[in-house]
Image (tube, grey):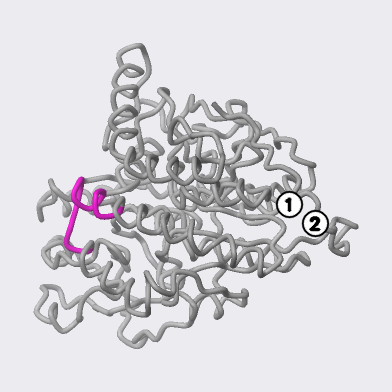
């Protein structure tokens, strides 16, 4: 299932570029990713780190993302000019921000299929024209590996979100199931994986139609779309569920965060009250359209002597929430990293970036999963003991207030978040991922083996006595 994919001589025949640091060959690396901040923020950070090591990095994306990619200091090459003209991502976000659960997932799948067809048409010529000799491909950009194989280029799969690799040792990341062991749990996970494969079957059919047209063998499942050379994930091993069985070339690293690569955001810092504990709340950039959720947050925190800051992620006008109880600070966008650094607690949708940015500062959290990989993030946060998780469909003022009180009142949550912070610091995710990518592109098509299943910190921070 996880054989190394030998792409052929086209890419291998390219001339080696001059050597970079420590005598390693320099590459011209292309990046293909899903078009949302939760994906391009970590991948621009990883691109910047590779660029700092002497490689040239070109990000292939739609027009709406030219500004943030260039602001990160990376080269930008537009693709999808016909399918995704300026303003397309705003229209997508306005559709998906009011959805949750299966409806949101289906909307996302339609977007992945549409993007796949565009990639098959536009990406090969653009990649050739840019002289790319290796590709870094987001796991969720599932068509990207087929493009790489067609061009004969080595590629590394990058899990910017929660890894979507399927195995029966853990539930699929889209389901809010708690982690269990035993025959019954494996059967439950097998059934969940089968459902997950069925949901993604339309994407797989789209990919396989193009593979037939290009003379490539069909992929047999979701796992077959990932690289057999190397797969890197920003999920740290310490936050992974124990016993996870992953392919030999899979590597947990740690958060891919680079504040210097993000555009500055204005914020009314003078409104912060240093006498009250700060709670930072965000539902990300795709699940921010349900104003009821933000009202529940404000009501839950009112009367707890907390200062609440709500970021709407660009999805709504702050004026629509001008009458919230407790007088929280409500902004369209927020300097998230700076606010988390000052926070006692974060409340979020369970996007992996927000969760990791919180844990990197030792900040406990309350997670309100809506869709996509967020239920899996919530399950890992609860398993680690660094926070609480409430599916947004079960969210009430009382439930959220209780969760906030517990996460802030029980010092064990901050202690466990602090342990994860230490583990994340030791993992040095950006440099570790860059090392692995450089090794993969310098191995001559041999898979870069990992320490999966033997990582000493995997699951080690789980508190005794928790479910």
Q: Are marks 2 and 1 in contact (CB under 8 Å)?
A: yes
Which numbered circle lies on residue 11?
1
Magenta highlight on residue 229: no
Q: Position of residue 38 (x, y in %)?
A: 42, 61
Q: CA distance from mark 2 to mark 1?
A: 6 Å
Q: Is residue 324 toward the left or the right of residue 161 in the image?
A: left
SS at badge 1:
helix
Q: Would you name the residue on which mark 2 appears? A: 14
Report the residue at 63% width, 62% height from top: 30
Q: Is residue 88 toward the left or the right of residue 447 in the image?
A: left
Q: Judge the density around disc 1: few (<14), some (14-19), many (≥20) Cα neighbours within 10 Å.
A: some
On the image, which quarter does residue 217 sit in? top right
Q: Is residue 147 above or below residue 185?
A: below
Q: Position of residue 378 (x, y in %)?
A: 32, 44
Report the residue at 23% width, 66% height from top: 288
Say whether residue 323 is visible. yes
Front residue of this view, candidates 95 and 406: 95
Magenta stretch mostly in which secondary structure?
helix
Q: Which residues are magenta?
A: 97-108
């Amino acid at each position: 299932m996880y054989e190394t994919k030998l792409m052929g001589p086209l890419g291998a025949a390219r001339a080696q570029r001059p050597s970079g640091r420590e005598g390693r060959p320099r590459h011209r690396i292309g990046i293909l990713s899903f078009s949302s901040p939760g994906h391009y923020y970590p991948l621009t950070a990883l691109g910047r780190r590779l660029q700092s090591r002497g490689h040239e990095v070109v990000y292939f994306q739609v027009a709406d993302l030219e500004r943030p990619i260039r602001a990160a200091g990376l080269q930008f090459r537009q693709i999808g000019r016909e399918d995704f003209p300026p303003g397309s991502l705003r229209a997508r976000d306005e559709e998906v921000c009011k959805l949750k659960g299966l409806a949101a997932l289906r909307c996302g799948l339609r977007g992945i299929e549409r993007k796949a067809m565009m990639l098959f048409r536009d990406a090969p010529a653009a990649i050739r024209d840019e002289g790319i000799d290796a590709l870094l491909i987001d796991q969720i950009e599932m068509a990207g590996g087929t493009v790489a194989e067609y061009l004969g280029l080595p590629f590394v799969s990058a899990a910017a979100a929660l890894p979507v690799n399927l195995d029966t040792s853990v539930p699929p990341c889209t389901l809010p199931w708690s982690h269990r062991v035993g025959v019954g749990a494996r059967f439950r996970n097998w059934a969940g994986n089968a459902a997950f494969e069925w949901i993604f079957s339309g994407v797989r059919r789209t990919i396989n139609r193009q593979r037939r047209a290009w003379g490539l063998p069909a992929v047999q499942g979701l796992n077959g779309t990932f690289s057999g050379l190397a797969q890197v994930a920003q999920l740290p091993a310490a936050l992974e569920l124990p016993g996870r069985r992953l392919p030999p070339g899979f590597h947990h690293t740690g958060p891919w965060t680079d504040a210097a690569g993000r555009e500055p955001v204005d914020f009314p810092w003078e409104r912060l009250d240093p006498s009250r504990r700060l709670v930072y709340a965000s539902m990300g950039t795709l699940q921010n359209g349900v104003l009821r959720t933000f009202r529940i947050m404000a009501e839950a925190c009112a009367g707890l002597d907390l200062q609440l800051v709500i970021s709407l992620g660009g999805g709504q006008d702050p004026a629509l929430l001008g009458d919230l109880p407790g007088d929280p600070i409500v902004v369209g966008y927020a300097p998230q990293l700076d606010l988390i650094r000052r926070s006692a607690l974060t409340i979020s949708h369970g996007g992996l970036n927000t969760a990791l940015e919180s844990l990197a500062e030792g900040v406990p959290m309350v997670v309100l999963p809506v869709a996509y990989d967020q239920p899996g993030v919530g399950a890992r946060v609860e398993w680690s003991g660094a926070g609480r998780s409430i599916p947004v469909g079960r969210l009430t003022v009382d439930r959220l207030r209780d969760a906030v009180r517990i996460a802030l009142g029980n010092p064990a949550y901050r202690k466990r978040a602090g342990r994860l912070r230490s583990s994340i610091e030791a993992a040095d995710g950006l440099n570790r991922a860059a090392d692995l990518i450089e090794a993969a592109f310098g191995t001559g098509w041999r898979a870069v083996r990992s320490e999966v299943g033997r990582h000493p910190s995997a699951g080690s921070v789980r508190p005794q006595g928790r479910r």
